[in-house]
Image (spheres, rainbow, N blue to C red):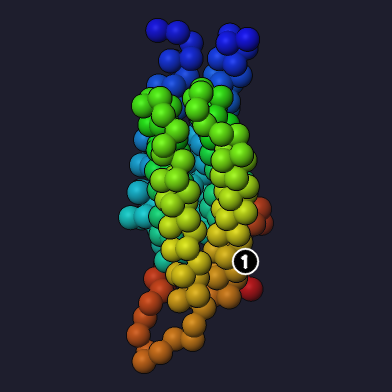
């Protein structure tokens, strides 16, 4: 039983680390503000949820209701922040990057 | 060193890298929104670092600290969004212009 919990915790740790690496590379390498807000809202949310589940698996005295509340809080706030950043960029008429070049609208 | 410890140290290295990426974007971003995205990245990385430190310390007393840090990052973003969506006053420039290339 403990071995199974350790294997699941290692899986969640490595999965969360992988998604956070993807998010960090995206924040550095993506071309414009919309793409960066997108990688902030998707990959980073999944990575931090995985790390929180790993914390709940590895610690004995953590209540699962608190872990669920924290995961729900992150699911509610990080995409909203990403959406607000995209909305501010759209209202300021920041140019977009598409596969056919830069677009200003 | 077991495989779980290896995954744990991998998590430390990854989070330091993500925080460095956020700081780089915070210093380099061509517009103000890119700097705000870098700030949000640093906040989330700090929250995940608190989670890893909680595993390292072996206690669950840092969950409230994680909640407070995540809430601070989110409300900073929301407050700055409402500041940016105000009409510009007194002709002051509050927004970095992009390079024209």
Which residue position is annotated with label 1?
A103
Which x, y percent locates residue A9?
56, 21
In front here: A104 or A80? A80
**Where is B71 relative to B14, above or below?**
below
* Residue occupying the point 58% across, 50% down: A73
* Residue occupying the point 36% across, 27% down: B57
The N terminus of chain A: image quadrant: top right
Residue B88, by quadrant, is bottom left
Which x, y percent locates residue B59?
41, 29
In front here: A70 or A64? A64
**Where is A77 relative to A62, above or below?**
below
Which chain's residue wears label 1? A
Residue B42 seen anywhere in this rendered image of the structure = yes
Which x, y percent locates residue B36?
43, 60
In front here: B41 or A30? B41
In front here: A15 or B2? B2
Judging from the image, what secondary structure is the residue with disc 1 in? strand
* Residue occupying the point 41% across, 39% down: B62
Residue B5, by quadrant, is top left
């Amino acid at each position: 039983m403990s071995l199974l919990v350790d294997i699941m915790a290692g899986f969640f740790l490595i999965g969360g680390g992988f998604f956070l690496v993807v998010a960090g590379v995206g924040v550095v390498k993506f071309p414009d503000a919309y793409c960066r807000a997108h990688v902030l809202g998707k990959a980073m949310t999944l990575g931090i949820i995985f790390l929180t589940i790993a914390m709940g698996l590895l610690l004995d005295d953590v209540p699962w209701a608190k872990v669920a509340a924290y995961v729900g809080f992150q699911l509610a706030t990080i995409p909203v922040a990403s959406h607000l950043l995209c909305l501010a960029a759209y209202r300021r008429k920041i140019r977009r990057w598409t596969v056919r070049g830069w677009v200003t609208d | 060193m077991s495989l779980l410890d290896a995954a744990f140290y991998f998590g430390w290295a990854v989070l330091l890298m993500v925080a460095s990426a956020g700081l780089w974007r915070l210093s380099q971003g061509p517009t103000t929104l890119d700097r705000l995205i870098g700030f949000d990245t640093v906040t989330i990385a700090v929250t995940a670092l608190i989670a890893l430190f909680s595993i390292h310390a072996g206690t669950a007393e840092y969950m409230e600290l994680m909640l407070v840090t995540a809430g601070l990052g989110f409300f900073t973003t929301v407050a700055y969004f409402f500041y940016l969506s105000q009409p510009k006053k007194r002709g002051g420039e509050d927004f970095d212009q992009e390079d024209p290339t």
